[in-house]
Image (cartoon, helix red, strand yellow):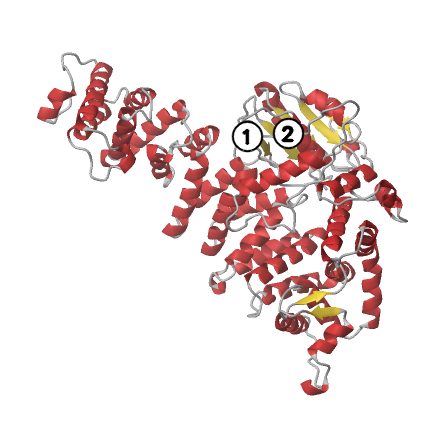
Amino acid sequence: MTGTGGTSISDPLGPVHSGGGDQNNTYYYSIGLREPLVRTGVDRLEIVREHRRRLARCFVWPGGYSRAADRLAQPGAVVLLEGPPGIGRRSAATMLLVGASVPGSRIEELPTVREEELPDPSPDDRYLLDLSSIGDNDYPAAQRTLMSYCALVEKSGARLVAVSPSGLEWMLDAELAPLVVHLERAGGRAVFSRHLRVRGVGFAYEQLDHCDLPHLFETAPMRELDRLAGLVVQARDRAGRGTDFEHWRDEAMAAATNWSQQVAGDLRQHRDAEQRALLLAASMTSGGPADAVLSAAHSLLGVLGHPQDETPRLARAGLGEQFEELSLAREGDGRVRFVRLAYDEAVRRHFWENFPDLRADFRDWVGECMEIPALGAEDRARLVGRFAEQALRTDRPDDLHLLIERWTRSSAGGRLRAEAAAALELGLSHERYGSRFRSHVYQWVTTARIAPDLARVLTVVCRQVMAVTHPEQAMVRLRHLALRQESPEDIKEAARSALLELARGNRRLYGRLVHRLLPRARPVDGGLDVLLALLDPAGLQHVHPPWQAFVLAWRAVMAGKPPRAWSPSVQRWLAALTLRQAGDEVLNALLLAAYGDRDLLNQLYVTTCDWAESEPVDMPEGFRAQREDRVRTADRFCREIDLAQGVGGVASASGALRTGEGP
């Protein structure tokens, strides 16, 4: 299954070939709709690593893969993958980049539409550009974007793998034609076998010759073979003792291939609107309380404008009877589930496929269901995931955009922020529409007005989701959120905290943020405050700042902020130097930042002397130093300041300490 999650990887792990012959590893991978990206207590980066490890274990080389790998071995190489849909081109692209990575390198997905800046690649960087969902109207512009990326990659010695849209080969620009490598479908039997083995399912080779399986091996998209293997595992886990692989296989095959006809037949028998509403409600809230299923069915009928049944309630069938007629089971805990494996998914698919004119009503209904008291947080999260799956499968991403906005309006009172975040992360993780959701987030953060709760959701998702797989794009969006003057202070502070955390963890991002915040024609509102926070050594424990950007940031802050604002940070750097937490380059940077401005150099001198004489009471515990050590550092720095001003004869800072004056 082609996937979306492994696009920012810090310690790549590729397949290992330990014997003779060909190596076949296929893994069709995604962090998909059934697996929320933001999990309580789980590091998002670790989730990405988990899936990357599984990708490395399961990947089967499609035809043409080795040719692409050979090309990518050269510094500055760009490969454009072509091939029929469903063969796992994106997974192949990810694995090519993993195989070409070096320790410490990263793999990042590039936007299909250029935003504010082009990337600034280094030789160790690896990039993925997925154009597979681009339509013919947008393909020419996407190719121009690809060409601009190619120029940067070739110049820097990085690597780039792009995935082209199927069926548009005739539109390919001649300049890009030499980059094309055509991939062919990997063996479906090998793919399915590998997925079963990775999941710990034992089987005999001849057991895969079951009636419909050979046909699926030849024709089914790789994502469907991955899904079928998952259904085998579900069948195994719910089966009793004494069952074997053939039993699990047959149940999984029925769930994967037969339920659509079964659902259609059931609905022909249940033409009553109330029965159908209950069936759809049960499929969307499967695993939820029986009361919630009934409430959701009533809500659906209301949204559709169905007239109420005038029959007295006691004269109608009870809930248990209705459940039994629809093959629903109410378990001992009061929660409702379908008897057949994966039947709820088939029901949802049937309604979205066969009632296209009701899809907007289904969207509004799901929005109303979020207010059902019997649905707990986990029930609502499952409902969001199930709706997102159908909306995106039927090419309606705007349904998610609309619900996200509704759930974050002031009238919602903040009750549905978690559901809005879940919907957004599922959109961002989608193979086809992920880039569209990232673009929509950019539109949100750059619009004139934005609801406070939407800003909170965007901050959380950029920080916890997008920052892991698309750090540069996350930084752009967080910067807009942090500098929005009309936003409440707590929202700006949260966005600023996320922005600083991202920049402090990566030298390249640190430098890019500094350059974006430097005042040009006029200072960016709030930009100097962010720069000042970036300069605080207390936040730079995991990365050494790029010194050119460090100097420029100090210059801007010293010129644009009063000394009382930046002097404490200078003193903390002096303490870090004294305690050997920083090197002499700090002194050089401060001197370069103030060079040519006598007032700034004088203020540096006074700030240094003040720190040597008396340590500030608010100095963090990790930056406290003995007085004699402070005087020794101050003495050296003050001599450097003297030299920078062309002043001689002042022996040390010790004399200045007695007068409290600079040179």
Q: Tell me the number on the disc at residue 118.
A: 1
Q: Residues within 10 Å of mark 2 (few under 14, many from 20)?
A: many
First reached walking from the N terminus: tag 2 or tag 1: 2
Horizontal side, residue 412 vs residue 584: left or right: right
Whether residue 522 appears in this view of the structure is no
As shown in the figure, which amino acid type bears the numbered disc 1? Leu
Quadrant of residue 625 in the image?
Answer: top left
Count of picture labels: 2
Give the x, y percent position of residue 103. 56, 25
Does the rendering let one see residue 318?
A: yes
Q: Position of residue 266 (x, y in %)?
A: 82, 68
**The one of 123 and 578 positioned closer to us in this rendering:** 578
Q: Quadrant of residue 237?
A: bottom right
Which residue is depicted at the point 75% across and 33% down? 60
The answer to the question of whether label 2 and label 1 lie on touching residues, with beta carbons closer than 8 A, is no
In the rendered image, residue 96, in percent from the top left (x then y), is placed at 68, 28
Label disc, if present, on residue 98 of the rendered structure: 2
Taking the image as shown, residue 607 lies to the left or right of residue 56, namely left
Give above or below for 451 relative to 304.
Answer: above
Choose between 249 and 365: the one closer to the eye: 249
